Image (cartoon, helix red, strand yellow):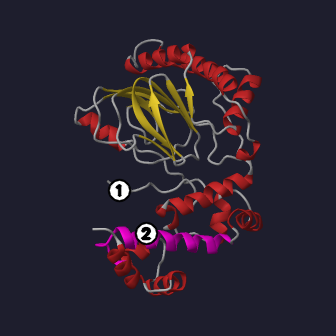
């Protein structure tokens, strides 16, 4: 099944970032396929929390499914750090194009700019808990601001931040402390509304982060400072253009590209030249043509105009000219040739 990717994290409008709407698991809960309990703010599903309660806590909860599912989450990004703990069972997990087979006791940590999904393609039998904390960043080069209700010392939070920012690890092994913390978090979610639940949840989250601090210090072997540089931000943006047709369909300008990478046009052009040996606008055009060619090959029933518009071209005539220049033939001839060459 072809999944439609959500809009990318770098969108037009400096404060606009797409987040997961969690509709697949909401539908699964409605149909009785899974047990789902969550507390949430914003667009996330679950019992609504007052925005003044534990600011920065966007979503926390767990699901329990006892058989293989016929659905998986769509590729998405979150507006905060997402920590997921697989208590029992197994399921697939993808992040930045890499696939992992999660098993009981695994822990995943994804940063706001990382495209990821649970299910590969579908969710396996699993009991899974999560928490999403907004630390005020959307790009890897921005400074993290942890919620004020956390009681970890400034030094410990600084060290934890450094480990999470500078490493590429996506999958970890949960410690006993983390397992106990998530168990308590699940109880708080299930019993929300009873006395002291807000305090108990705050204590459990702090305990989780203490355990997380120990895990990332012990298990992470190498720090990679380049992962928080402006150059890496541009690299992520260019990869998104290359891999995600939805990114290319946005009406990018050179200025909007620079704005959404948090830099000026000169810096963006410099990094783009270093990374892909091309200018930002020219590279965008190349990516649009590659996505369009793939659409012509794989979607024989979709009109050429629809494919052109869907990959960011606003003129079918210009698309035909650019396509001819890139592939040496018009779009219609390319479609016929690739359809003939495809195995029956």
**Nearest the eye: 46 or 33:** 33
Q: Is residue 12 above or below residue 82?
A: below
Q: Is residue 122 above or below residue 204?
A: below
Region in magenta: 279-304
The structure residue drawn at horizontal position 22% and vertical position 36%, both measured from the top left corner, is 31
Residue furthest left as drawn: 31
Mark 2 = which residue?
A: 294
Mark 1 = which residue?
A: 2
Which label belongs to residue 49? Answer: none
Left or right placement of residue 192 versus residue 8 in this view:
left
Quarter placement of the C terminus: bottom left
Q: Main secondary structure of the magenta part?
A: helix
Q: CA distance from mark 2 to mark 1?
A: 13 Å
Answer whether labels 2 and 1 touch (C-beta < 8 Å): no
Q: Position of residue 226 (x, y in %)?
A: 74, 46
Q: Position of residue 335 (x, y in %)?
A: 37, 78
Specify whether residue 300 is painted magenta: yes
Q: Position of residue 190 (x, y in %)?
A: 38, 19
Secondary structure state at the residue bearing disc 1: loop
The structure residue drawn at horizontal position 74% and vertical position 29%, both measured from the top left corner, is 158
The quarter of the displayed image where residue 316 is located: bottom left
């Amino acid at each position: 099944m072809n999944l439609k990717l959500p809009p990318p994290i770098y969108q037009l409008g400096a404060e606009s970032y797409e987040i997961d709407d969690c509709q697949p698991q909401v539908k699964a809960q409605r149909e009785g396929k899974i047990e789902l309990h969550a507390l949430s703010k914003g667009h996330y599903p679950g019992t609504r929390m007052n925005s003044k309660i534990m600011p920065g806590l966007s979503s926390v909860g767990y699901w329990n499914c006892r058989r293989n599912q016929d659905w998986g989450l769509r590729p998405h990004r979150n507006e905060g750090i997402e920590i997921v703990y697989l208590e029992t069972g197994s399921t697939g997990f993808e992040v930045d194009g890499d696939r992992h087979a999660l098993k009981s006791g695994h822990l995943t940590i994804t940063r706001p700019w990382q495209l990821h999904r649970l299910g590969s393609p579908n969710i396996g039998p699993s009991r899974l808990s999560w928490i999403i904390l907004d630390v005020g960043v959307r790009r890897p080069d921005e400074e993290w601001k942890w919620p004020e209700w956390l009681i970890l010392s400034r030094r410990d939070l600084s060290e934890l931040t450094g480990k999470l920012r500078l490493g590429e690890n996506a999958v970890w092994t949960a410690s006993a402390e983390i397992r106990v913390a998530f168990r308590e978090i699940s109880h708080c979610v299930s019993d929300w509304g009873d006395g002291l639940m807000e305090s108990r949840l705050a204590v459990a989250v702090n305990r989780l982060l203490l355990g997380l601090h120990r895990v990332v210090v012990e298990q992470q072997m190498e720090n990679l400072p380049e992962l928080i540089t402006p150059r890496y931000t541009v690299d992520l943006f260019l990869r998104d253009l290359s891999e995600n047709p939805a990114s290319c369909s946005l009406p990018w300008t050179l200025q909007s590209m620079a704005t959404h990478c948090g830099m000026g046009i000169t810096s963006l052009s410099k990094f783009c030249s270093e990374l892909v040996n091309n200018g930002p606008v020219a590279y965008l055009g190349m990516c649009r043509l590659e996505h369009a060619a793939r659409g012509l090959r794989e979607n024989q029933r979709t009109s050429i105009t629809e494919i052109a518009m869907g990959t960011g071209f606003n003129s079918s005539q210009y698309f035909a000219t650019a396509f001819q220049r890139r592939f040496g033939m018009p779009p219609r001839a390319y479609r016929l040739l690739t359809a003939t060459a495809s195995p029956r």
